Amino acid sequence: MKRRFHKYFPWLFVMGDLLVLLVGLTMVVGLFRYFIGYPEVTIKLYGYFIFFWMVISIGRKDFKISRTSEIGFTLKQIPESLVWLVGLMSIFWIPSQEHPLGVFFLVGVAITLVIFLSVYRVSVHLALKHYRALGKNYRNAVILGRTGSSIKLARVFGQRRDFGINFLGFYDNEATNQINSRGEVSKFFEEIDQLDLDLIYLSEGLESQTMKQVMDYADERYLKVKVIPHGNLQLEKNLSFSKYGEFFVINVNEIPLDSFLNRVLKRSFDIVFSLFVTVFILSWMIPLVGILIKMESRGPIFFIQDRNGVNNEVFRCLKFRSMTPNDYADTKQAIKNDPRVTKIGAFLRKTSLDEMPQFLNVLFGDMSIVGPRPHTIPMNRNFQLQVEKYNSRHKIKPGITGLAQVRGYRGEIENLRQIRSRVRLDSFYIQNWSIWMDLSICFRTIGELALNRDNAY
């Protein structure tokens, strides 16, 4: 069971978390009611606790128990989550309480939950390690290059079955007759599509060109690449480490948004920004623009199109309809003086107001305010064949605006040079993301819309 477990385990973990929360909360409520007659037991009280704990637990991804994390990491997560819970309850629930012991009640709940959740989560942690040791919930891995360090790592995989790493063997040009050998490195590229790989480990003896070739392949197929470090390793990326017992490997293709805190920061910005636009702009813009669209031509107000999002997953992208209904919307880009574009549509496209409904896509979680612009599925398939590392732009959610757009690459794609430039800028954004870059792009987008409309049609 390789994939299915990953899909259902988070929900089972969260439901177990909630059950433990309810048991602990009920016990503390019973004790406080028995001794001091507080608090008043209401659905509102339980609702606050359940809602906030689900938001915290899911948002912090407490259910994500790393293959190599130890019990100490699991225990460390509990007080951090409970601090968030007590803080939110203090803001939203305590002000409604007149009893002076409200804060002490929350502290009592927190202390009780530390004990209850510790027992539960440590049990789950141990059970998960045992489950992986039985050969379940595994990840397939190979090592390129047989050296002392890579042999030692392979030995760790064999000894620590609880890591859930299914080691398939070595690819090495020299030691092709050794145990666990699958052949030369060139054979790896012949067999790679049949291996159902998840992890690729590169030893220090590989040539830089081979490393680059492997990393390019992995970026295209969303595989994780890890380099077994040595003293002379020189790479240009910011590196992070994974720990396997006492053994360290380098994560080569980590990006800033792999960090939980960075994802929370970006998502919080997306929600606040898009919620503001939805409430104060889209609430009146959709009816007004909808009437103008309907007055000029028959058809729906919105143009809904399948596009590729994060990890190439398809989502339904929203736009105001700017063309008369036609059979070529997915395959033929809009060109200058395109006869399909309506009069109101021309205005919407010129001002980019046709993109405004995508703030709803941001609220739904399909898009971000800033990110690589999503393309239609046929365009995506075509560009994958023509542009190197094109798929790497799908590592993160697509955006309403992006670095490529504020650098002048907006509108119709007329040649391969333009899409290659867009991909390079998207890649730079993904590798160097910061919240300040997002804010800068948002401000520059406003200037771009006001001063540069030549490519919008």
Image (cartoon, rainbow, N blue to C red):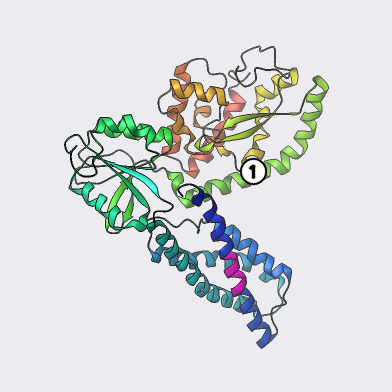
Q: Give the labeled residue for mark 1.
A: 363
Q: Quadrant of residue 288?
A: top right
- On whether residue 375 falls in the magenta region, the answer is no
Please give left or right for residue 47 compared with residue 397 in the image. Answer: right
Judging from the image, what secondary structure is the residue with disc 1 in? helix
Q: Quadrant of residue 168?
A: top left
Q: Nearer the viewer, residue 279 or 127?
A: 127
Residue farthest to the bottom, as pictured: 35
**Numbered marks: total:** 1
Q: Quadrant of residue 390?
A: top left
Q: Is residue 187 above or below residue 242?
A: above
Q: Is residue 412 above or below residue 156?
A: above
Q: From this viewpoint, is residue 302 visible?
A: yes
Residue beneath the point at 68% across and 17% down: 327
- Label 1, residues with CA under 10 Å away: few <14, some 14-19, many ≥20: some
x and y percentages locating residue 62 in the rendered image: 50, 59
Q: Is residue 74 above or below residue 98?
A: above
**Which amino acid type is shown beneath numbered disc 1?**
Leu
Please give left or right for residue 162 compared with residue 289 in the image. Answer: left
x and y percentages locating residue 146 in the rendered image: 20, 42
x and y percentages locating residue 128 in the rendered image: 44, 60
The span picked out in magenta is 17-24
Please give left or right for residue 57 compared with residue 47 in the image. Answer: left
Residue beneath the point at 47% across and 38% down: 395
Task: State whether the magenta stretch is mostly helix, strand or loop.
Answer: helix
Is the C terminus in the top left, top right, bottom left or bottom right quadrant?
A: top right
x and y percentages locating residue 398 in the rendered image: 54, 35
Residue beneath the point at 60% across and 65% down: 18
Residue beneath the point at 66% across and 80% down: 100
Q: Nearer the viewer, residue 331 or 268?
A: 331
- On whether residue 21 falls in the magenta region, the answer is yes
